[in-house]
Structures are given as C-alpha cells and as structure tokens.
Amino acid sequence: MKFNQNLLADIFQDGMVFPRNKDFKVGGYIAPKQKVEVNFNQHAYFATSDENGKWKITLPSVNDDIVNSLTVKSNNKTQTISNLKFGRVYLLGGQSNIEYRLKDEKHYQEIVSKLKELKYSNLYYYNIPQVDYVDPKTGEVKPKDLQVEHWHHINENNAGMVSAIGFYMMLALQESGIQEPIAVVDCFKGGTSASVWIKETDLARDMDLKHAFLDKYHETIAGKSWEDFDRETKAYNLTVEKHNRDLAKYLKMHPDTSLSTAKNIVGHTPWPPPYRPDLYTRPSGLNETMLKQIEFGVFNQMVWYQGENDTDRAKYYDKLLPLLIHTWRQTLHDPSLPVKLIQLPGYANYPDNSGAEIRQTQLVVSRTVPQVDLVSFIDGGEEHNIHPTNKGTMGMRLGKIMAGDDYAGTPYVEKMDASSEGTKFRFVFKIARCQKLHLEKETYLKVKYFDKKVEQIKLNADNLQNNKLILELDDLPKEISYAYENYPHHIGLYNELNYPLSPFRVGFIKKVM
C-alpha cells in the first residue's frame, strides 16, 4: 500500500539512506504489465510490473557518496529522488517501548541542547506511517489524518519523534567510531501482539495459533454490525476517560507520588479495546498495512522489542516469535537478516509469572533461530511502570553491541553440566558471551525440589569461576532458576562488560529407581 501515485514506494524519497556495500532494492506499484526503467550510477536497469502492478529491481552496492540521485521512468512518467546517502540502516520493530519517542524520554532537553550545539550529526530516521486499516472496497485509509512520511536528518526540531532507544543506539554506534550516515526505519505500534504482524495464512497453519487468535477474533465479531462495534468502542473510550480523570485527580492530590506508584493504586489504563474489523490489534492487522510498506527495504540489521502484549497468552509465544522473525525476513527477501532480540525488562504487573515466561522464550529463540542475538535489559525496568522513561542505558547498550566491537549480545547460560558424588549434586552453568562473571549486588538462585520445598541460595565469589556459575546441592532439584519472575529484585550477575546475565530456568527429571 502507499499514500501517493509515485512510481516508487513511499519509503523511497529525497534524503533516503541506503546500506553501504550491500546490494539494495528499489520498487513500487504501478499499472500491471508496465515496463520500468531505473537510471542509477550511469547505468540503466529494466523490469516489468507483474499482474498486481508490483515491480522491483536490485541495484549493485555503493561504497561512496558520489552517487546521490536515482531516476525511474514508466509509461511517460518520471520520478527522481536525490540527496541520497549510503551508510548503515537499521530496522526497528515491536510495540510501545521501542516506539517510545525521544520527546518523552528522561534526558530529552539535554539531547536537544547538544543538537543545537551540533554535537550529533549524520543521524537519520524514517517513521513508517501507522496505518490501522485500509477499506478493501473504497481504499480509504484509517486513521484518516495520516500523511506521507519523509526522511529526517536529525536536528533539535525533529528529534522528538524518533524512537528514543533508536536514537541512543545510533549515538552509541557513532561514538564507536562509525563516521558514515546512520539511519533507523521505525516500523512499530504500541499495544500489539506478535500475532498482529504475522500473515493470516501462517497463523492458520498452526492449530493452536489459529484457535487462540484467529478463531477467537472471528467468534468475537461474528454477527455484529458497525453500530455494535461503535457502541462497544464508545463504552470502552468512556472507561479510559474515567481512568485518566481518576489518575489525574490522584496525582494532583499526591504531587510527590510517581506515575508508576499512582497507576499501581488507581489502576492501569484499560486494555485492550474491543475487537472490530478496522482495529489494528486484530490478528494479522498490521502485516498488510505497515509491514507491507517496507517490503522493498534493505537493512543491515533488525531490532525487535515486543512481548508485553502477549503476556496474557504467553504459552503461545514460543510459536509466535519464531514465526514473526520468519515473516519479517520473508517479507524483506532476506532470510539471514541479523536480528537483535530485546529481552523484556522487569515489570511487576504482568499476569501470573508471564513476563518471566516470555523472557525464557526470547532466550530459547535467540539460541535456536540462526542469526538472532539476545540483548537483555532485565536490569532496566521499573516495578510498576511498563514504560521506563530512561531509555539511554538501554539504547547505548544496544548500540555498543551492534557496533560489533565485543560480543554479539548479552550473556546467557549456554549449557549446564550435572554430576553427583554420594549424596552431593554439582551443577556447572557455562555462560556464553562472558570471560569473567561477577556479582554486582546481593544475588540469589531459586531451587525447587521434588518434595515441593523451595530454597533461596545466596551466591558469593565461591560460586563463580571465570565464565562458569557453580552450585552444589544436597538433593536433586526439580528446577533451578535465576531472576525468573515478573520483576526480579536481585539482579546481580554480570559479565566483564557489565552486561547482565539473562534470567533462566532449568528443569530436571527425577529418575525412578
């Protein structure tokens, strides 16, 4: 889908940043079976649009900035994009924490001051328009007030609308010594399940996902008219408005109370809104309206930060997350696209222990899906605020890792060896992406036994040996875990670069004699 009638898709505009030293695509949608000519770097390239009007051409890599324009011709129409840049381009996807704008971040005014002093340069962004729905009959786009987006060279006037984590990530990359242009393409939407970004046909192939997401959605909207949907939406909006009034009243009466504490007392914003056919939270809803807009994009790496909205159905995330990564790679025609997978920070108000379950899935996926690296922010959350306002630590950590100067991600348990001698049991956890593990503060492992006894074991220097975590027990455990809860209070295991060890849970089987 696109907002204009240009020959090129909307993402191709003046000031665009392409990856350097990497073949890249250009393309768009025109009339079916039309010839297209692309003139670039003193060469002409040709293609013909298919029966749906789609066309694309792959252009050879560029390693300098001498080439700064590209021209497309078709059916007596011409489009030229100029002021092109070649550097590093990163795709950011997910929900509200990666969407969290720099203007709302804790250090925004400090950043603006530095931008005014021209302290940061050569940073760019492009925000994919957040299209909720396209009417299949009329082509009407919702929301109606959406406009064509443009590429932005970051300055003090436009920095507020870039992803805060994305900005700090680019800043860390630049501080690592990268001098070429650095850009992020923001393709995210708050309040989204992974199911929103996956093709409906792919969801339908798995019976569990079909039942939990597609069938539930269709059963919920069955037999309802647009008047019914509007009535339900109105009632929901009134509930949200009342909540916002109650929250504002409480904060006015208790001005020294933090927002997270107030929400824990008054309650959190009602979510999700009731299903309706034009709501972006419907299964596969954004796959065709937002993901479609980047199908011609080429990226150096992708960052995925999501999972909060799947905590109510966490048992399906081990199927959703690999399928989502496959969907995005397939859409981009890049099956080996490197992915940095952000592990959820701590937050106390997830149902049951589902936040921990999501993190465990993220850990497993990063170890089993090729070219996926885990970046843990388990130490970056706020107990009762799902949107931490300090994104600097998270973004800078991500950028340092993406710069490629050290490890490809944060440390995690790579394997576990168990042995027994008499009545003693010894467990050695080997930590990947770590040369030397150390304790930052008071830290515990939780041990559950088959007789239902639970033991908290305080760690000390004797439990650590370079990149190994060693534990000796008097009985065979049913389970050993570290920081496996929604909001862990005892995060203390770090590698030599001060990257936190990912939470983990390991289970054991008791042999029957």
Image (spheres, helix red, strand yellow):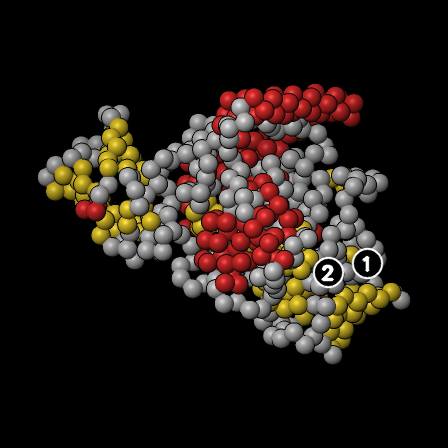
Q: Is residue 317 left or right of residue 242?
A: left
* Residue lying furthest bottom: 42
Q: Is residue 495 left or right of residue 238?
A: left
Against 448, residue 428 (above or below) is below
* Residue lying furthest right: 76
Against 316, residue 40 (above or below) is below
> Which three-letter amino acid code belongs to the residue tagged 1?
Asn
Picture residue at 81% right of the left edge, 53% below the top = 4
Residue 209 in percent (x, y) is at 55, 36
Q: Which residue is mark 2?
A: 12
Secondary structure of residue under mark 2 = loop
Residue 413 in percent (x, y) is at 33, 48
Against 312, residue 64 (above or below) is below
Residue 411 in percent (x, y) is at 36, 51
**Residue placed most toward the observer, 150 or 73:** 150
**Residue placed most toward the observer, 507 or 98:** 98
Q: Which residue is mark 1?
A: 6
Picture residue at 53% right of the left edge, 38% below the top = 387
Spatial CA distance of label 1 from label 2 is 10 Å
> Which three-letter amino acid code belongs to the residue tagged 2?
Phe
Picture residue at 60% right of the left edge, 22% below the top = 249
Q: Is residue 19 visible?
A: no
**Nearer-N-terminus badge (1/2):** 1
On-image quarter of the C terminus: top left
Picture residue at 45% right of the left edge, 63% below the top = 404
Q: Is residue 266 visible?
A: yes
Residue 126 in percent (x, y) is at 67, 55
Q: Is residue 252 left or right of residue 351?
A: right
Mark 1 and 2 residues: CB-CB less than 8 Å, in contact?
Answer: yes
